[in-house]
Amino acid sequence: MRFANAYFLLLLIFIPLLIYTFSWWNKKKKTSLIFSSIGTLEKINPGWQINPDYFLTGLRLLTLSLLILGLARPQTGQKGEEILTKGISIMIVLDTSSSMKAEDFKPYNRLDAAKKMAAEFIRGRKNDQIGLIVFSALSFTQCPLTIDYGALLDFLDKIEIGITQTDGTAIGIAIGTAVNRLRNTKAKSKVLILLTDGRNNMGEIDPITAAKAANSFGIKIYTIGAARKGGALYPIDDPVFGKRYVHIKEDLDEDTLIKIANITNGLYLRATDTKSLKNIFQKIDKMEKTEIKIKEYTNYTEVFSYFLWFAFGLLFLEIILGNTIFRKIP
């Protein structure tokens, strides 16, 4: 709360002075009667009584105090903020091909590890638009650019192997889909984070051509190769022997991923386990920070009327009591 006309509060200094004056005057005007004996008076029990003069004067002083507070214009405020700086638009592109089931990111497979680290990355952002794209032989937008991180995390949680109902790795098409989502944003910076464990083997768009298109729109691409060197164990559900594991060879096309990053002034990073993948997302998070300028403001609401109405109510009460139960005989 604040007072718009705070100088009126100086009038409250006179309230203690008025109290002292009333007390001094009340003592001065006291009279006395002489009795031959007060024995009889001592037996009288008058009970609890209100001194009319003190009570009515107290109401007047309280009324005066409330009037002074009303003149000072008390106001309550609600703070708000206006964000002046535009954040970053980030599109996270995740490979959902069948090879992402490989379990070299213990205790997760490649896709689950990527989802976990992407979720931590999203929770650490503020005022940035973030979207999700999934791909294998085809690609589609799982979640468009949004600042509703709660909904975004729900969409991220629903990503699973085979969500596109195809298999293969169409990196060029995935980049093209992301570029189409990012190209018209008004953000200060546009970033694409591409995570895959393979090489482009599907689609009509070449990854290098897609990277050049991204660069023409000012989109920076961070490429992440998610695969342990030397291959990994891959789970197979055998109808006879149940779940078993086979060893699959490493099929990560690092050369292409490096070229994609270099064309767009981005960076290629290799993740071989959960810890290194976490460090990669943390590194990207630190590199893609923007200083947010915020203008704070306060909306004030006038509340002086409450004080004035309360003061008038006390004044009315003082008049009623002064002319009824506390009325004096001249």
Image: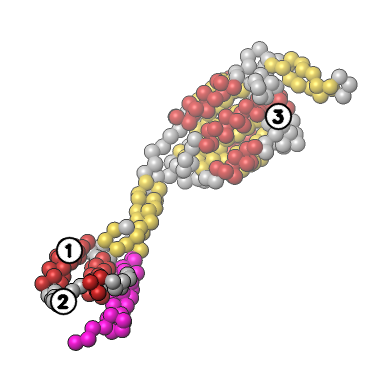
Sequence-wise, which precedes: disc 3 or disc 2? 2
Asked if 74 appears above or below 170 in the picture, the reply is below
- Find the distance from the CA under tag 3 to the CA under tag 1: 82 Å
- The magenta region covers 302-330
> Does 14 appear in magenta?
no
304 falls in the magenta region: yes
x, y percent for residue 146: 55, 45
Q: Is residue 297 above or below residue 304?
A: above
User: Which amino acid, mark 1?
Assistant: Pro
Give the quadrant of the C terminus.
bottom left
Which residue does the image show at 57% across and 32% down from the upper left? 118
Badge 3 element: loop
Q: Quadrant of residue 254?
A: top right
Q: Residue lying farthest left?
A: 28
Amino acid type at image mark 2: Phe
Q: Which residue is mark 2?
A: 35
Q: Is residue 121 visible?
A: yes
Q: Left or right: where does residue 8 sit relative to residue 196? A: left
> Which residue is more in the foreground, 329 or 10?
329
Circle 3 or circle 2, nearest the eye: 2
Residue that protrudes farthest toward the right in the picture: 240
* Residue 16 marker: 1
